[in-house]
Image (cartoon, grey):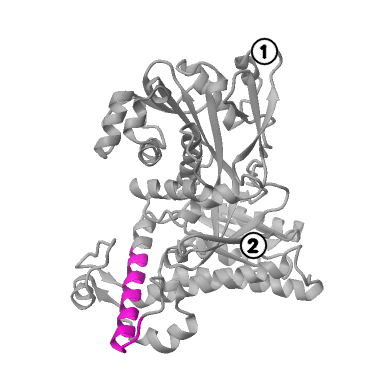
Amino acid sequence: MFRGPAPWRLYASRPAEFIRRDWGTKSGGFANRKPMRMPPGANPRILVSMLSAADDRSVVIQALLRDGGCTSAEDIILASAPARLDISGSLAAHTGGVVAQCTLSLRATAAVAARHDGRFRMFNCASPHESEGHTEYSMQDLIQILQSHDSPQSGAWREGSPPIGFDLAISLLRRIVAPADLGNSRWSNGLSIGIRNGIGLSGSTAAATAVAAALAQCLSEYHRLPASPLDKASMAAAALREIGLFQAHTVDALTAFCAPGGSVLNLLRYRCQPHQLLGQIPLASDLQLLAVEITDGRTDAPEAARRVLLAGAMGLRAIETVYRDLGQQPNTSGYLGNISPGLYNRYFRALLARRIRGRDFVRTYGELPGYAIDPDHLYHMRAAVDHLIGEGEYAENFLQVMEELAPNSAEPLTGPARILTAQRAGRLLLASQHSYRLRLGLSSPGADWIIARLTDAAAGRSAYGARVTEVGDGRLVVVLLPNSTMATDHLLGVISEYGREFGTYPRVYRIDAPGSGGTLLN
């Protein structure tokens, strides 16, 4: 099924004026504003009702209008953020390494509108005719929540389940607006927030990141906060961490703001010290990237990933201690990613404990600020550092290969040399996957099965490489393969075989230009 971009994307800040929101490079993943005058005497509700019911943005707008607290569509501020996908270097983002990301053709939409009844109301937008859940407070109650810094989940749900993103909205409000400001006329009349999550991807933080980015965009615009994309991405990531998604990184949300529009997918290249976008690499037309969502994953993957990062921080402390014992100042700048693989393998790897119990580490090296070390847990320090240093190197080399294959390359490759180079990119993905599976044990049987089948076929038909992304629970696999009918047929054959083997069929998403609808192949 293919859902194309909606003909209307609405934003309004002045009477009798709609703003069509088009996706383009000037504002990244969020829309530019182009005025378009309404016909004299036109009814905003009628124009809104003419939108496609399948479009997430129109669903949110109609839900806010139907709620009754919003006077008209002209009061609505709308933003839609794409889901991000980690191509390579996922966990290395937390160690100062290089990361490659892009966006999926799946979106979360948020909208903010002024009310006239002095209430704060937030709800999920399920369809044009119903909501999945909502909550409501007076503005005075909201001020108390923001000032208390307690959890907002106080059992105030009026119907259904708590709205997705409610805790995110409260956390973002604490960062964007001071509680005293809520007493002024712009806020005291009330506020409506609607969210439509069209991403899915069970177990993935990609949906939460997109919701956070869209909310940050809407709330900062409503508050007239002159925040840069990096400022809004930082707020979104901090809010995600506050509600328990420890692995949320600023670059994850920044991808939603920086992903360009157009007909060519771009890979975003980051250096995470702490978050620097180094550039974007267009994907060659003879390659395609797919995301395969399988059905079996690991429920313990987030906790296991947290322990890997903690073990990596332990390894960094041990390496820095070696520097000091030798009378030298560590040149890591606090990042494991600043230690080259050659230097690490030659001098430090043999000095790291394979396994160390939490209490033994604290007794030898002291506490680690920002980490809660379990005194009884046995941390696999060496394996974690092996993976984290290697992961950043795999991502850097993968991006260099993709630059060689890019259509704007200074020395374009052709013929057999191009195929060999694409195969090298695939092997780097596979090397990352093998490290993730063998060193950390964080893959899943279904992912291992499908990656093995995808990369085991005749030349020209098989995928170049694949790996489990680290945005969820091991259910999402990114695949690099030739942009050919034979390769796609091979992929669909593997999907069918997976369904017969495991009893359920994976979903396959094309990673298309941002702004397009998701393509479900199976």
The vertical placement of 14 against 448, above or below, is: above
In the picture of the structure, the residue carrying the numbered disc 1 is: 42
Percent position (x, y) of residue 97? 48, 68
Query: Picture quarter containing residue 429?
Result: bottom right
Density class for disc 2 (Cα within 10 Å; few <14, some 14-19, many ≥20) is: many
Number of the front mark, 2 or 1: 1
Q: How far apart are marks 2 and 1 (CA)?
A: 49 Å
Q: Nearer the viewer, residue 414 or 343?
A: 343
Question: Secondary structure under badge 2?
Answer: strand
Identify which residue, 183 or 426, lies in the foreground: 183
Q: Is residue 247 magenta?
A: no
Q: Which residue is drawn at 48% across and 44% down?
A: 207
Amino acid type of the residue tagged 2 in the rendering: Leu
Q: Which residue is drawn at 48% across and 25% down?
A: 113
Indicate the position of residue 361 as horizontal and vertical percent values.
Answer: 23, 74
Asked if residue 320 lies left or right of residue 261, the reply is left
Q: Which one is earlier in the sequence, the residue at label 2 or at label 1?
A: 1
Can residue 377 be seen?
A: yes
Say whether residue 81 is left or right of residue 122: right
Q: Identify the element where label 1 is drawn.
A: loop
Please name the residue that numbered disc 2 is placed on. Answer: 480
Q: Give the range drawn in magenta.
A: 307-329
| Residue 133 in picture, x, y percent from top left | 40, 27
